[in-house]
Image (spheres, rainbow, N blue to C red):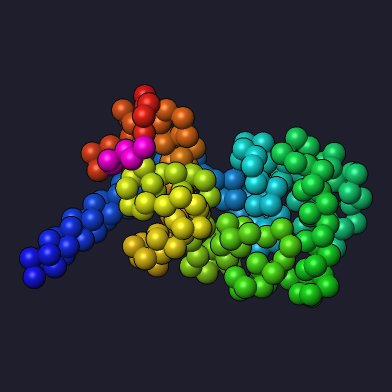
């Protein structure tokens, strides 16, 4: 009985701390930069295909590099057919210097061809179908669902994974495990927001090496799990 009481008390403390964390993130990210995908949706409207392509191009590349390249590309090609009309060698030059630009140029072609062949040129609306496209992983699928279709989905990239663990709201080794754990503690209404909030937080404050803890509004509620050096 005492154990149950202790467990309930711990849970209450955690949910209060989590609520505080979410409210600080909601408030402070209003004035912060926006992840690249929002610049794309702001400029071109909510288009699942553009979200998909920009997410594929952004893998292992900084948003500051990917953003302008996506904008230039989408000014010329906004559909699977239009991407396929660009020869791979030209596409490589257009998307350089995103990381792995050669592999990504080919990937853009295979993904576009698959969409035309199996999905009538439309991006599918389910996680299962999205994951059936070669080259599309959980992070991309969830971002497309959330930002392309507005469906509650929780997209976990390296920033979301790192910051969630430092905050001690999850204790996980991989982004996939983080997604599963976050889904059990974050209210569904906030699933879409978590990516927006934690990506900018991870880019601007809780950076990978030596985070800016001294000026972080989350400092009073953050146990800084695993942080050895900070500024
Ligand atoms: S206090 Fe430090 S470790 Fe915690 S979220 Fe802020 S920057 Fe990251």
Q: Is residue 27 above or below residue 231?
A: below
Residue 217: in sight, yes or no? Answer: no
Q: Position of residue 218 (x, y in %)?
A: 30, 40
Q: Tell me if 201 is positioned left or right of 56 in this view.
A: left
- Indicate the quadrant where residue 117 lies: bottom right
- Indicate the quadrant where residue 133 lies: bottom right
- Indicate the quadrant where residue 47 lies: bottom right
Q: Tell me if 226 is positioned left or right of 127 in this view.
A: left
Query: Which residue is situated farthest in the top direction here?
Result: 231
User: Main SS type for the magenta part?
Assistant: loop
Q: Position of residue 72 (x, y in %)?
A: 76, 43
State yes or no: residue 49 in magenta.
Answer: no
Segment colored magenta = 222-226
State yes or no: residue 223 in magenta.
Answer: yes
Residue 108: in sight, yes or no? Answer: yes
Q: Is residue 208 above or below residue 199?
A: above
Residue drawn at 74 percent across, 71 percent down:
122
């Amino acid at each position: 009985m005492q154990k149950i009481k202790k467990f309930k008390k711990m849970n209450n403390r955690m949910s209060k701390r989590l609520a505080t964390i979410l409210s600080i993130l909601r408030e402070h990210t209003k004035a912060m930069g926006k992840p690249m995908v929002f610049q794309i949706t702001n400029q071109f409207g909510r288009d699942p295909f553009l979200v998909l392509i920009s997410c594929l191009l952004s893998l292992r590349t900084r948003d500051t590099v990917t953003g302008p390249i996506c904008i230039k590309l989408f000014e010329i090609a906004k559909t699977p057919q239009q991407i396929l009309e660009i020869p791979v060698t030209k596409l490589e030059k257009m998307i350089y210097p995103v990381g792995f630009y050669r592999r990504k140029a080919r990937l853009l072609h295979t993904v576009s061809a698959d969409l035309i062949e199996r999905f009538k040129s439309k991006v599918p609306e389910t996680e299962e179908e999205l994951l059936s496209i070669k080259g599309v992983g959980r992070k991309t699928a969830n971002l497309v669902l959330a930002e392309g279709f507005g469906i509650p989905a929780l997209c976990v990239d390296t920033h979301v994974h790192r910051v969630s663990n430092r905050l001690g709201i999850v204790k996980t080794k991989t982004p996939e495990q983080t997604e599963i754990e976050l889904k059990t503690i974050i209210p569904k209404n906030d699933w879409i927001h978590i990516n927006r909030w934690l990506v900018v937080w991870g880019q601007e404050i809780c950076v990978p090496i030596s985070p800016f803890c001294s000026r972080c509004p989350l400092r009073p509620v953050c146990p800084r799990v695993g942080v050895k050096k900070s500024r």
